[in-house]
Amino acid sequence: MADLFQQQSPLVQIELGAATGSAPQIREIPFLGYLNLRGKPADTAFLAAVLKVLGCEPPIEPNTLVESGDNRVYWLGPDEWMVITPTGQQGEVQADLQKALDGVFSSVVDNSSGLTLVEVRGENAGALLATDCPLDLHPRVFKPGQCAQTRLAKAGMTIAPLRNGEGFEVIMRRSFADYLLLWMQDAAVAFE
């Protein structure tokens, strides 16, 4: 009976083979924690509570992200952020945030079961994604520390350059994961 509740990646059925030629490497980082955080950035009590729990305030500059320890906080809107935690830590982080934010106008919702992250690495990672993404992904324009909500092959995603600038992380809804990964694999053939 326990097998019925075993956590599975949305991409469990898709084989991620090694990249060939100059094709980008594509790999899923499954089971991370994803918390949706809402609050008023002008509220000092909100900022102090988030700082206490995460070790950083949420970014207030549009389309940026901050990292603190193992957590990353992505700006999604003027009063909305996505907090990514290591696998299995989202429940504890959510509880700590809710406790710290008690009495403060805010919301913390666990979206972990609805999202997954795929890394696209290599010299042609940006070119692969640019085949059907409207953003300018060139490193002169879209740099580490930035993020954006956009679309890829008609599916919504959040994208951010990797810290080292060697590719991108693509955060997508679980329901679109197999479609987007298969699309990326097909598009990658042009770089082999």
Image (tube, rainbow, N blue to C red):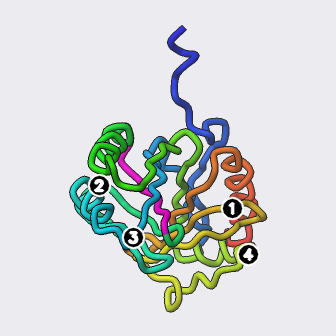
The numbered disc on residue 41 is 3
The numbered disc on residue 70 is 2
At label 3, the amino acid type is Pro
Q: CA distance from mark 4 to mark 3?
A: 36 Å
Q: CA distance from mark 2 to mark 1?
A: 25 Å
Q: From the viewer's perspective, is residue 42 above or below residue 176?
A: below
Q: Estimate the x, y position of residue 131 in percent, counting from the top left.
A: 73, 75
Q: 167 or 48, which lies in front?
A: 48
Q: Is 160 positioned to the left or the right of 177 in the image?
A: left
Q: 110 or 12, which lies in front?
A: 110
Asked which secondary structure carries label 1, the reply is strand
The mark lying in front, picked from 4 and 3, is: 3
Q: CA distance from mark 2 to mark 3?
A: 22 Å
* Chain-order first, disc 1 or disc 4: 4
Start-end of magenta stretch: 79-87
* Chain-order first, disc 4 or disc 3: 3
Q: Which residue of the protein is positioned furthest toward the bottom in this rendering?
A: 140
* Chain-order first, disc 3 or disc 1: 3
At label 4, the amino acid type is Thr
* Chain-order first, disc 2 or disc 3: 3
Name which residue lies at 55% across and 64% down: 120
